Amino acid sequence: MIAERRTTVPESFTDSERRLADYEVLLEIGVKLSRTLDLPTVLETALETAEQVCRAETSSIWELDEETDELFFRVVRGQAAGEIRHLRVPMGHGIVGIVAESGVAELVNEPAADPRWHGDPPGFRTRAILTVPLRVRGAVIGVLQLLNPVGRGLFTEDDLQRMTLFAGVLAPPLQNARLYEAQERQFLKMVTALAETIDKKDPYTGGHVRRVVSYSMLLGAELGLGRGQLKELWLAATLHDIGKIGVPDRILCKPSPLDADEAELMKRHPVFGAEIVAHLANPSVLVGVRNHHERVDGRGYPDGLREDELPLVARIIAVADTYDAMTTSRPYRAGLPPAEAAEEIFRSAGTQLCPTVVGAFRVLFADGRFELAKSEEVLRSIYD
Ligand SMILES: [Fe+2]
């Protein structure tokens, strides 16, 4: 660990030896940051390093919202984190806003005597503040701030210099991760719009895609999927019925049950969907789309895969899709009440549906957590 190495620099080091050790740390952290485009990873790594290099109680990164000209907390660690998480500071206001506007780092060792200081949240006392701008090609994109040095009363000029150097290393990878995330959000919006276009063709199942996405997120989180896997699941669930664009409207919108030929044609939608998605998604998303109508007993379609051959993404979407289909009314049959649909899901474990996923469904349902609104938190954890 890079930060651990820094803390082991002996007190007997001369100034030049200490400086060399600092550069080494910065070089290593620069290499580490440049290896990822994942914004939360960049932010966490940055704060962890900043706190340990300068040994501070609390640290935060503020990002500039160009639309409102305000700074907001992108990430905050340490004591008082919860209290200040939702603060927004206008450019030019407070120490953070002034550093962002001027682009000049500041060391404030007596905040109470500084008229720009807006006071502490309850239960926290700020003794010293170190604030440095994050600049990319001359423009400030945010601010890195440390509060209260650990084991000493005040921050020093040496700390200020070290953090200024670190900010120079941090800003470019941070900007890359921000741009990558913005691009990803744009892609997700386009995918959602595309999926909802198809969804709207069927007036009887309106909102099906969003509900399947929500249920899939709840199941995925309950099964312990990581952020990357949840993102793939989100994409696959959003696109799971995209292949219905290849099914004629007279079948897709038919207000009565399908006959055998029509049902056969409808059953081709996962294959159509996989063909479309093949151009824009990775293999995990692809199988989620192609195999969401498989059954664990091998009697599903289009490939007749069995449980051990079925990717988890497809098994999760199958449970979400089945539950929504059962609880949604069609012109020729009323949707089941949730408790009855849940009983059906329980009974289908091991034949149609995966017992592991049904197990997660059972826990969520029993706890009253299998609710559309409760998926918002999971969605935020992926994209906020
Ligand atoms: Fe489907």
Image: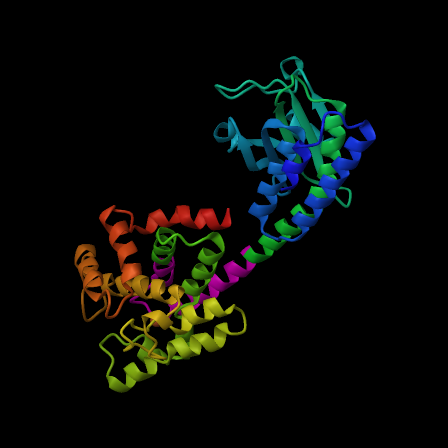
Residue 96's place in the image compared with 173, above or below, is above
**Residue 351 versus residue 84: which sits nearer the camera?**
351
Q: Is residue 122 magenta?
A: no
Residue 117: horizontal and vertical position, in percent?
A: 63, 20
- Which residue is most to the top? 113
> Could you tell me residue 362's position as x and y percent?
24, 54
- Is 331 placed left or right of 235 in the picture? left
Query: What's the magenta bit mostly, secondary-structure-wise?
Result: helix
Tell me which corner region of the image, top left, top right, bottom left or bottom right, holds residue 248.
bottom left
What residue sits 71% from the left and 31% below the top?
A: 9
**57 on left or right of 323:** right
Identify the image quadrant of residue 5. top right
Q: Residue at x 80, y 32 (%)?
A: 17
Q: Can residue 268 be seen in this snapshot?
A: yes
Please say whether residue 201 is one of the residues in the magenta stretch.
yes
Q: Where's residue 93, x and y in %?
A: 65, 27
| Magenta-drawn segment | 185-213
Q: Is residue 135 visible?
A: no
Number of callouts? 0
Specify the quarter for ligand 1: bottom left
Question: Residue 279: where, in percent of width, then height?
Answer: 54, 73
| Horizontal side, residue 179 vs residue 195: left or right | right
Residue at the extreme bottom: 261
Residue 81 position (above or below residue 140): above
In the picture shown, does residue 331 fall above or below 144?
below
